[in-house]
Each structure stands twice: as structure tokens, then as C-alpha cells.
Amino acid sequence: MHIWMIGSGYVGLTTGCMFAYLGHQVTLLDTDAEKIARLQAGEIPFHEKGLPEVFAAARKNMAFTCRWDDFSTGADVVMVAVGTPSRESGDVDLSYVHTVAREIGRRLIARHLPILLKSTVPIGTAKEVQAIIQQELDNREWPGSITVIANPEFLREGEALQDAFYPDRLIVGTDDGQCLSTVHQLYQPLLEQRFHPPAGVFRPVGYAAPALLVTNSATAEMIKYASNAFLAMKISFINEFANLADKVGADIIDVAKGIGLDKRIGPHFLQAGIGWGGSCFGKDTKAIVQLGKQHATPMQLIEATLAVNQQQRQKVLHLLMDELSDLHGRTIGILGLAFKPNTDDLRDAPALELIEQLAKYGARVKVFDPVAMETCQKLFPTLDVNYCDNVDALFDGTDAVILVTEWEQFRDLPFSRLGQYMTEKRVIDTRNFWDPARLRNAGFSYRGIGRGQLP
Ligand code: NAD
């Protein structure tokens, strides 16, 4: 099949590479000319584990353009993966999706075409996009038609390729039976799992095939929001218990293990820490709260989920103040900038908010991240931090080091040596990533989240 993928960001590029690897022809259209130029030159414009390898293998089936004038007639399917950021109010900014709808409507000359919305969009958007495109077709009296299908994406950054090749489920929201056969054809390689995975991507133990759930478009759109809201809620839930654990001498790691052994609860997304960040949870939870307000149906659990997450970010600062009392003139090292490991994505990254707060209290900030520093310098050129070349340089002369992103390469650091470089041997482990005993044996004052630190 020939797929036109509109938007080549984290979702568009990784899923585009996956479809091309599986043998489809994929044309990526993105209005960001620099991004397209880099792709044409064989470069990946952001960091995602395993993407360069899959891209190299799939590239022969891929084409790239930044010009809507190239939008072709030969497409079997169009997929839309442009951004849907939050507005200040928490409402979703659908301007990119609407622009894409108008561009498609103005150019389409096929008779009938399925358009899959992979972007996360408020409930009702697939119908709205359908109406916008149809209006454009009517304006130029083109007799063709389109069907807009809600087909939300569930991949996790940092594990995007693993999730693209081995998704838990495919959600297809449409009432149009005719289009369903095209969607089946599109996803056939995944549904039948007849492919050799690319290097670095592994078939999960016991994995058979993704579940395919066909619903109406509103249901599909709601599934995406409900999934993200539930995951965010699990994290806020365990963080709230972690804060209590600190007060009563319980260890949240064992609490999470104990409750996760209950099959009805499960072990995932119960890691206490600094709270969630990234481009999706914040904007999607805010969007569902707004939608509830519009329909006079308060989404109280989700409102609380957001509030707990915001407080959790402050908690790290309180822990630090508890240790150092006055931050003015102190030097604090931040280990990890990205909102999670294996990505350079800094959208709503907790580290950035922490850096801002530290600066407000007069602290000097040093940072090290294995891949996100270049992105940080580019996106936030005025950020007042000292970028370090390596972990040694980060520890050198600091009064405390705060681990914010749990990159695997930070796990077994030579703490005894690193401690010698510090003014005072203190770490705050906001991901409960390190073994407290090991740090304490190396002479550090160790603070985790919910590890039973009685006041
Ligand atoms: P992104 O910002 O990385 O990429 C979006 C791309 O769309 C950009 O490259 C941008 O230049 C391009 N674009 C904007 N307007 C365009 C236009 N008119 N024509 C062509 N291209 C245009 O965003 P992302 O992280 O890939 O997310 C895309 C969507 O997928 C969002 O709705 C997001 O909520 C959803 N989603 C994201 C993830 C994730 O982990 N990032 C996971 C699941 C779903």
C-alpha cells in the first residue's frame, strides 16, 4: 500500500518507519523543512532507541517532502500524526489538525480515501475533520469522498519501535465498513505477525498478535484519553502513598510490589518518583478535565491526578531544602534532563521545572544528560546552567546531586570516587533508582521518594 504520513515527529516518523519496514510505501510530509532535509540526508532528527537501524533498513520504501503541493493522488491511505498541544486554558489546540484537513480537502483527487487520525484528539474531532475535508471537496465540486477514522497511537517514547511492532491493541474508530478492509490490509503484517523484527526489536515473551477493536470514532477517541488518564492516575496514586510512606516509616518500593502482585492491580506504573512529564500525560489529562467541564461532568479523579503530580515536583525541592536549608550560592547537579530515558524529548520534563526553581532560590545548577543536552541548548538557549561533559564533571564541586532521569548508564556509577569530588556527599534519587545501602556505604546522605525516611 502507499501511505501518506502527515507529520514526521515522534509518532509519524517511528510508525512511518515501521510501515515501510513491513513493506508499505511511505511518503512523509512535514512542513518543517529542516526536519525533512535531515531525513532526506539519512539523518534522524531526534533521539529514539533503535530508530536509526530501522530507518536504515526501511529507507528504500520511504520518501520525504515538506511541500503540500507534492501531495499525491496515488495514496491508498493518509495518516495524520501532527501535534495537538495544550492551550493555556488546557483545551487542545487543534489548529495543526484543522490545517491538515483543509490542505487534504483542497488537493484530494481520489474517489474514496480513508484518513486515519493517529494524533490524540478530543472526542468528536474525527467527525469534525471529516466535515472540514468534505466542505473543501464540495467547494471545488469534487465528487470524491473520504472517511476519517480515529486510530489513536499508544507507543511510548524510548520504546517506540518495540511498541510499534508489538502493540497491545489496534483501536479503529469508524462506522464505515468499506474502509475497514483497507485498514485490515494496512495492519495485516502486524495482525499476522509475519515478519522478522529489525535489529534491537524483540518479540515479547508470549506475544501472539495485537487485539483489534473496532468501535465508533467517539469511543476510539475516548479510549486514548482514558488510557493516558488511567496511567497518569496510577503514578499519582503511588506518589501520594509514597509521601505518606516517608512519614510512617514504610518503604514504597515494597508497597508497590505488594499491591502489584494482585493481578487485578498489576505491577506496572507503580514507580514512585518526581511525577510524570512528557508531551502526553499533562496535555491529555488537562484535555479530559476541560471536556468534562464542557459537558458539566467534572472529572474529579483526573483533576486530583494533575494536582498530585504538580505537588510531587515541589516535593523534590522540599527534600533538598530539608538537606541544605539555604540554597543560595549552593551548587546543585542535575543528572538527566529528558522526561524519561532513551529519548531527548524535553516536553514538560520535570528537570526543567526543577532547574527554574533552583535558580529562583539562588542555586547554581550543573547538568548532564547523555543525549538531551544539545536539544536543551537549542530549545532553551537562555537557560542558566553549566552543561557538563560527563558524570565526573557533574559531581565535581556540587553540594548535592539530584537524579532526575533514570538512564541505565547511571545505575552503577563509581560512587566512592564521585563522592570525593563533591563539596558535600548528598544525593536525591527522584526515581528510587539507586540502592540506598550502596550510597550510604559510600558515605552519602541518600534521599529517595517514599523510602520510609521518618522526619
Ligand atoms: P511532534 O511534535 O513530534 O510531531 C508533529 C509533527 O507535525 C512536527 O514535525 C510538525 O512539524 C508536523 N506538522 C505540524 N503541522 C503540519 C502540517 N500542517 N503539515 C505537515 N506536518 C505538520 O508530535 P508527536 O509527539 O509525534 O505527537 C503527534 C501526535 O501523536 C499528538 O497528538 C500526540 O498527542 C500523539 N501521541 C504522541 C505520542 C508520543 O509519545 N509522542 C504517543 C502517542 C500519541
Image (cartoon, rainbow, N blue to C red):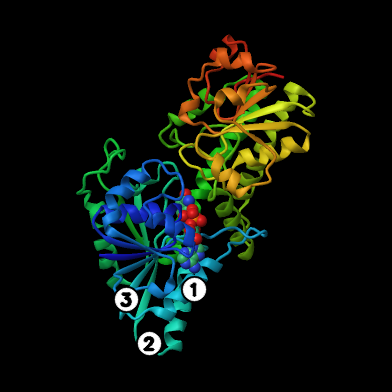
Whether the residue carrying mark 1 lies under 8 Å from ligand 1 is answered with no
Front-most of residues 288 and 74: 74
Looking at the image, is mark 2 or mark 1 nearer the viewer?
2
- Return the x and y of residue 43 as percentages of the image width and height: 40, 50
Query: In which quadrant of the rendered image does the N terminus lie?
Result: bottom left
| Element type where label 2 sits in the image | loop
> Could you tell me the amino acid type at mark 1?
Glu
Q: Residues within 10 Å of mark 3 (few under 14, many from 20)?
A: few
Report the residue marked by disc 2.
Answer: 142
The numbered mark, 3 or 2, whose residue comes first in the sequence reads 3
> Could you tell me the amino acid type at mark 2?
Trp
Q: Residues within 10 Å of mark 2 (few under 14, many from 20)?
A: some
- As drawn, the residue found furthest toward the left would be 194
| Element type where label 3 sits in the image | loop
Tell me where residue 455 sits by quadrant.
top right
Report the residue marked by disc 1.
Answer: 128
Report the residue marked by disc 3.
Answer: 73
> Could you tell me the amino acid type at mark 3?
Thr
